[in-house]
Amino acid sequence: MRILGVDPGSRRTGYGVVDANGGRITHLAHGIIAAGNGEFTERLATLFAGLSDVIASHQPECVAMEDVFMARNAASALKLGQARGALIAACAHAGLKVTPYSPTTVKQAVTGFGRAEKEQIQHMIQLLLKLPPPLQEDAADALAVAICHANHVRGPAGRLAEQMT
């Protein structure tokens, strides 16, 4: 199963593509869709087009996306929600279902600790997928979402350490 993981952001969205085959997860691609600092509606269009290009290039079978969480700033959360909506629309346009995961669930799946720091996520993704440093934070988060989905689809019988190649 080819999984596209997405870490949404209104300025930078991370993506990661992995193949999950039985007990193995293999890295295929990762990167950032940079929407920049321009007009918000233009950034949303950039996110939609950028993710559409990733989908066309890598042909995922499913998409896992980090869910919006409520931070201290409600305006930022609303913008993140709108960015996430543009990204979901790109997936829907390609006929793909999006499965949401909370940040805590993603962190738990990759590090074993739901309150792990960003650096811990980056480090574990580099180890698990055998990627050279540096690994951008947003791309690491997106790969973590993809791995989280692979683990959830496979169920409790599969353990992360047994799955990595």
Image (spheres, rainbow, N blue to C red):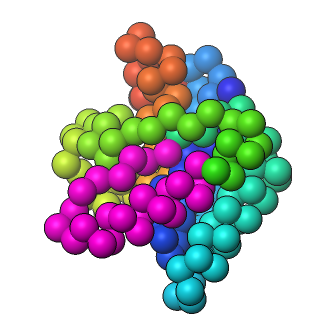
Is residue 150 a member of the stretch shown in magenta? Answer: no
Q: How many marks?
A: 0
Q: Does residue 8 sit above or below 4 in this rendering?
A: below
Residue projecting furthest to the bottom: 38
- Which stretch did the figure color magenta? 65-88
Is residue 83 a member of the stretch shown in magenta? Answer: yes
Q: Residue at x 40, y 39 (%)?
A: 101
Q: Does residue 137 sit above or below 55 in this rendering?
A: below
Q: Residue at x 35, y 35 (%)?
A: 109
On the picture, is 35 further left or further right than 151? right
On the picture, is 152 further left or further right than 87? left
- x and y percent of residue 25 in the render? 59, 33
Q: Nearer the viewer, residue 67 or 105?
A: 67
Can residue 91 be seen?
yes
Q: Residue at x 61, y 17 (%)?
A: 22
Q: Nearer the viewer, residue 156 or 159?
A: 156
Residue projecting furthest to the top: 157
Q: Residue at x 71, y 65 (%)?
A: 50
Residue projecting furthest to the right: 56
- x and y percent of residue 93 in the render? 74, 46
Predominant secondary structure, magenta span: helix
Q: Does residue 71 sit above or below 93 in this rendering?
A: below
On the picture, is 82 further left or further right than 109? right
**Quadrant where the N terminus lies?**
top right
On the picture, is 47 further left or further right than 161? right
Q: Does residue 100 sit above or below 127 in this rendering?
A: above
Can residue 134 be seen?
no
- x and y percent of residue 97 in the render? 62, 33
> Which quadrant holds residue 157?
top left
**Quadrant where the C terminus lies?**
top right
- x and y percent of residue 20 in the render? 62, 28
